[in-house]
Amino acid sequence: MAKTRVIVVDDSALVRSILNEIINSQPDMECIGAASDPLVAREMIRNLNPDVITLDVEMPKMDGIDFLSRLMRLRPMPVVMVSTLTERGAEVTLKALELGAVDFVAKPKIGVADGIRLLAQDITDKIRIAAKAHIRRSHAPVPTTAGGVHPAHPPAGEAKPVTIASLGRLSTEKIIFIGASTGGTEATKDVLINLPADCPAVVITQHMPPGFTRSYAARLDGLCRIRVKEAQDGERILPGHGYIAPGGFHLSVERSGANYVARVQDGDPVNRHKPSVEVLFNSAAKVVGPNALGIMLTGMGGDGAKAMKVMKDAGAYNFVQNEATCVVFGMPREAINAGAADEVLPLNEIAPRLIERLRNTSGFSLNRV
């Protein structure tokens, strides 16, 4: 089998050397070039035609975001971003995912060499996933402020789609549960921005490391009609709100009297993930039962598939993203194979069908759980 051919783009000679070493230590991949800036990278890509590139965010001559924007419009290909564990690093990384980067690796601010070596397994896993991902050409230029920073809140009317009629009180006792991994930041956004302000509460586990989920929640809050935040342990789960599992913690739901509350807890990884979709979906089946609606979006592996079947057996109604619109058709495929899906849909049809389902069903109450 041919090896996955990778070009490393990073302004640090040390980082380039370590990534080269990590990649070449794998039997199924090779580093065919290393560039210190995007201008050199551009020529390497043109001449060497790699399968995947790793791309630093902050570099001289042209920053990684501008380079990625041009790359995905002119010559789309799998990209794994190399970010820093800072607030700005998180914000820029989210913009990179919006532009079409498949995934990212978060390197520490200090102890970079040792930190990257500790991430070797994560880096090579993400390169493998990226090599098989469905890549789409980006058509729209990306607006920036004068300082090159992308605005947290888009101009009024630019990101939000046409007006969606309210759902009213009939669905306020239901909860929507979303699980996602690779490609899921944008897929989840595409679902949430099409939900009305009074939709049921949405509880989300997206595989992300600590330090990134707060920025992700803030970005969604600026784009969506519902309020979106990082979940806090013990807080009441309310209609018209979205709750993101904090990176490095499991998120589940519990009952407290007549209310649902979020439970944010440390613990061992489940299916190699923390947060894990399995943990969230199992709590949905146990606590919410027929009042739950499940959504499985793009992602590698099988996290949450078995628990989604448990949700269905408990009376939940489940939507699964189809292969054609997934960046990686791993988690959705496993959910389908487990018999967990009620409907398999293109990404752009999930929110409309979810709303239709909510409008056409009523009479659920906490007493039935």
Image: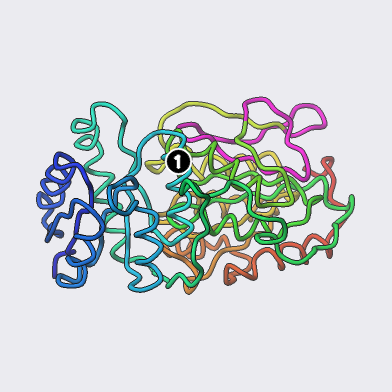
Q: Quadrant of the N terminus?
A: bottom left
Q: Which residues are magenta?
A: 232-260
The spot of residue 139 in percent (x, y) is: 48, 72
For badge 1, the amino acid type reads: Ala
Left or right side of 318 for 101: left
Quadrant in the rendering for residue 58: top left
25 in relation to 116, above or below: below
Query: What residue sits 30% from the left and 37% below the top?
Result: 107
Residue closer to the observer: 306 or 190: 190
Of helix, strand and loop, which one carries label 1? helix
247 in relation to 325, above or below: above
Query: What residue sits 38% from the left and 67% below the top?
Result: 72
Residue closer to the observer: 259 or 26: 26
Q: Is residue 187 visible?
A: yes
Left or right side of 320 for 196: right
The spot of residue 66 in percent (x, y) is: 39, 57
Left or right side of 215 for 260: right
Callout 1 environment at 10 Å: few (<14), some (14 to 19), or many (20+)? many
Left or right side of 235 for 59: left
The residue indicated by pointer 1 is: 90
332 in relation to 245, above or below: below
Q: Report if residue 237 lies within the magenta region.
A: yes
106 in relation to 67, above or below: above
Q: Report if residue 304 lies within the magenta region.
A: no
The spot of residue 125 in percent (x, y) is: 27, 51
Q: Quadrant of the C terminus?
A: top right
Residue closer to the observer: 173 or 111: 111
